[in-house]
Amino acid sequence: MIQSDTRTDTREKQYAPASERSQTHDDPERRSMSDLFKELRDESSLLLRQEVSLAKAEMAEKTAKFSRNIGYLIAGAGVAITSVLFFAMAGTVGLYNGLVAAGLSHATSGWLAPLIIGLVISIIGYAMIQKGISTLRRASLLPEQTVDSMKQNKEWIKQKVKS
């Protein structure tokens, strides 16, 4: 019975937060090197698990946001393509009639109107593609919070080892 209680106490101390575990040793001068290394190992292990968990959560959040925005982009592109086709047809007919009214022949107006409308739409499309590319280049899927936290943890471990 007494041994099982001792084991339970040891387990509770082992899985307790570092601040509670260190309180069990009243005098830091009395702590052995093995105790210090065990504490460093345990805290480092806990820290690594927490960092992995943070990285997973951050990547899941970024992936979900990225996927949702790609979905919006695809849906918007479908609607935009349909509307561009209708505007292009209307613009072509209007420009054709304007060119005929300006004195150009039906034959010349028939190929010049779609050419002008196509050129304008191509320039707009090129500008939009460049905007999308530049935005995607700036986007990062790197878990930045985790990387920063890992750098801080590295410094913390170095300080723990030195002291």
Image (tube, rainbow, N blue to C red):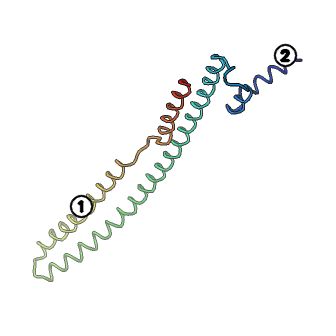
Q: Is residue 104 above or below residue 75?
A: below
Question: Splitting the image into 4 quarters, where does residue 142 fall?
Answer: top left
Numbered disc in front, either 2 or 1: 2
Point out residue 28 in the picture as x, y percentages from the top left corner: 67, 24
Q: Marks 2 and 1, how far apart in space?
A: 81 Å
* Tag shown at residue 43: none
The kind of secondary structure element at disc 2 is helix
Q: Name the residue rendered at 41%, 56% in the picture.
A: 73
Point out residue 110 in the picture as x, y percentages from the top left corner: 16, 71
Q: Is residue 12 left or right of residue 43?
A: right
Frontmost residue, 55 versus 83: 55
Frontmost residue, 5 versus 28: 28
Question: Splitting the image into 4 quarters, where does residue 79 fall?
Answer: bottom left
The quadrant the N terminus occupies is top right
- Callout 1: 10 Å neighbours few (<14), some, many (20+)? few
Q: Is residue 6 left or right of residue 61?
A: right
Q: Amino acid at mark 1?
A: Ser
* Tag shown at residue 122: 1
How many numbered discs sit on the rendered protein? 2
- Callout 2: 10 Å neighbours few (<14), some, many (20+)? few
Q: Name the residue rendered at 22%, 66% in the picture.
A: 120
Question: Which one is earlier in the sequence, the residue at label 2 or at label 1?
Answer: 2
* Residue assigned mark 2: 3
Q: Name the residue rendered at 30%, 59% in the picture.
A: 128
Q: Name the residue rendered at 26%, 58% in the picture.
A: 126
Question: Splitting the image into 4 quarters, where does residue 163 fall?
Answer: top right
Q: Amino acid at mark 2?
A: Gln
The kind of secondary structure element at disc 1 is helix
Point out residue 150 in the picture as x, y percentages from the top left corner: 50, 34
Point out residue 117 in the picture as x, y percentages from the top left corner: 22, 68
Q: Is residue 99 left or right of residue 72?
A: left
Q: Is residue 146 above or below residue 121?
A: above
